Amino acid sequence: MLRRFQAGSRSAAGSSVFHLISRTRTGSEPENMWRSLKSKQAGGADENPGGARMRLPKMKIPAKIWRHRKHKNQHGDDQPDGGHEEEEEEQQEEERLDDLSRKLILREEELFTQDGRSEEEEDRLLKDFESLSVQVWMAVHSSFVATATPAGRPDVLRSAVDTILQQETQDQRWTERPADSAPVWRPLRWLRTHNLLLQKMVEKQLKDAEENETGDTGQLSSVTKRQVCRLGKRVKEDLLTVAEAVRHCYPSRMDILNIYGGLYHQAFAARLAQLCSSELDLDDCSYLLFWVNHYYPDEILKHKELDGIKTACLGSLLQPDTLGRLEEQYLSHRQVSHRQVSYRQVSHTDRQVSHRQVNHRQVNHRQVSHRQVSHRQVSHRQVSYRQTPELIDCYYFSPLAIDVIQVVNSSLTEFSCAIKDQNKALRLTIHLENFLSSYRKSVEDLVKVNPSNLHPVLKATLVCEQQLRDYISGQAEGLAEEQKRRCLDTLSALRDCCYQCLTFPLHGKIKVFLSQLWTPPWVDGSLPVVDQLLSFLSQQLADLSDLKPACKQPLVCDLHQDLVAQYMKKTMKTRVKSRQQQVAGSERMVEDAKKMDGFFREQGCGSAPYLSETLCSVAEILRLQDPASIQLEVVDLARRFPDFSGAHVSALLSLKFGLSAADVRSIRASVEENRPLDASANQSPPFFSRVKVKWINNKINQIKS
């Protein structure tokens, strides 16, 4: 036998044992493996019939040890004293694998340091090494066997690992000695054989998982999805087993968790590469990307029990070219879908503009992974121009925004899990931006057509605008800041279009009412201009009772700002004829400011007290006669309103009697010197930009010329 061994390579011992393990495995249980190995070893003893054999230490395999211990724990209390003595005798014969390894090393040292050793002695020692190796590989191979987990007997695997390291150390000792003095089987390279065995074990684990049709993957819609799920779950379960039970049987310097992590990563990646070699449909492509870019790296490798795996060294499960091809397939399809949604949603409004009747069609609901509302459902949200939007809780409502938000949000959620580079989300979100632009244009065209149900449609559109604004401002995580800004600007233009259409009849009436300001009847209080105006507005705003309060409030506030701006513009264009008129007019302004503030508070707009304060500040400037006091008030107004320009200062000072040219120049200079350089929290929102005073600039230019 020794001659046959010498004819092979020095690593033949380790390799033959490894292949013996593979050939003798007739089932997943170590007991079946052991039966084949036992018969093999029995046949080996006949190779030297009649030869004198020294008594070898009795060695038991892990499965037999575990069965024996289990039986002992169950029946130990019922056994007579003789039974206990028999067990103690068996336990004395059982020896740890590392103890047997040390004895074999001592025998090897003794045999190869003496002169005149016989081939028969070498042959017996080699067989003992092979017998030990079988038990070692059996212990390692049982790492994932349910009936013989390391958690049940960690000492067996720990002893096997110690044995491997002992033999590696002995290999190193022999390399430091003359080559002709070393045993022919050295080096054994058991550590390399151990790593090869782990690789084969991992591959077998994944192969068994892929072929196992049992489990909870039946709800997945395709064979590919079920295969990927079974593979991934097996990777997770086995790595957790390594972390919880196997890792503690190895010294930390071996870093066994990362060894297993690398092996499972390679095996998982190889199987996924085979699946990707054929053409995948969109659902399978999305599901595979979900595992590759999200669930595997974020949920498995970052599991708290797997802390210590060097994820950066593993890389992606797919090669860059394969991953890029799948991501491009996914993105291309999603781009087409979003483009179709945008086109169909806009064509919904275009049908209203063209006055074509659109029949409702029943929506076919389809279950799509990671989606709540399908693109087809959204595209069928089409309403005829003759049909008024539905009333929900007495307010006009349109489901368009909700459908768009659900499609966009589900797409972005799916995208964040399917695509690693989140910057590529722009290829999808650009269609939301395009949709909003087209939606705004379609509404503007609808306003030009002016159908009979225009106001109900616009009220429902304002509800959509608010819902889209809230989503984009706070919840749309896939949008870049610049893209958010453009979308919000588009929504602001859409909102302004609706506001202008709904309040357009009011603006002309407001201008007519305010034309009576600064007339003698208004100055002396006999003409209640603002009272009449507010009574008219109360009647008109009643028509907005079917507009959702959250949308009505900003519209009413915008109307409040516009009313005060027109009031201010009328005041600045007035030519006051006397100081008495200034004082009396200032008193009327204060009264009007309080009335307007109270009215709009009742209408739900109580967030703009600065408008009333602004009118009162201008009234105070008109009332004052001392140039120094006037200067303080004008400077304060300029500090609170950054858009209070030099033209506004000139228009306001032109109303004053008794101010010399030097006083006007001094006040203007003081205003410019005291303007804040940066925006302040004490500053009010822009207001004077609504008050157009180009006429005062033209007048100043005429005087200068």
Image: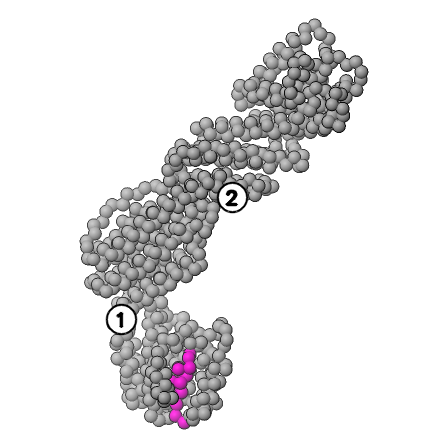
Q: Circle 2: is it few (<14), some (14-19), or many (20+) Cα within 10 Å?
A: some
Give 617 or 301, whichever is nearer the viewer. 301
In this image, 244 relative to 125: left or right? left
Q: Which residue is mark 2?
A: 298
Q: Circle 1: is it few (<14), some (14-19), or many (20+) Cα within 10 Å?
A: few
Query: Residue flagged by tag 1: what amino acid is it?
Result: Phe
Figure quadrant of residue 189: top right
Q: Which residues are magenta?
A: 644-658
The residue at 48%/43% (across/down) is: 294
Looking at the figure, which quarter contains the N terminus?
Answer: top right
Residue 46 picture location, percent across and down: 65, 8
* Residue 393 in sight here: no
Q: Secondary structure at mark 1?
A: helix
The mark found on residue 373 in the picture is none
Give 31 or 597, whichever is nearer the viewer. 31
Toward the top, the furthest residue is 50
Query: Residue flagged by tag 2: what amino acid is it?
Result: Asp
Q: Is residue 655 magenta?
A: yes
Residue 563 picture location, percent across and down: 33, 76
In the rendered image, the vertical position of residue 640 relative to residue 24, given as above or below = below
Q: Which residue is mark 1?
A: 504
Q: Secondary structure at mark 2?
A: helix
Label whose residue precedes the other's in the sequence (1 or 2): 2
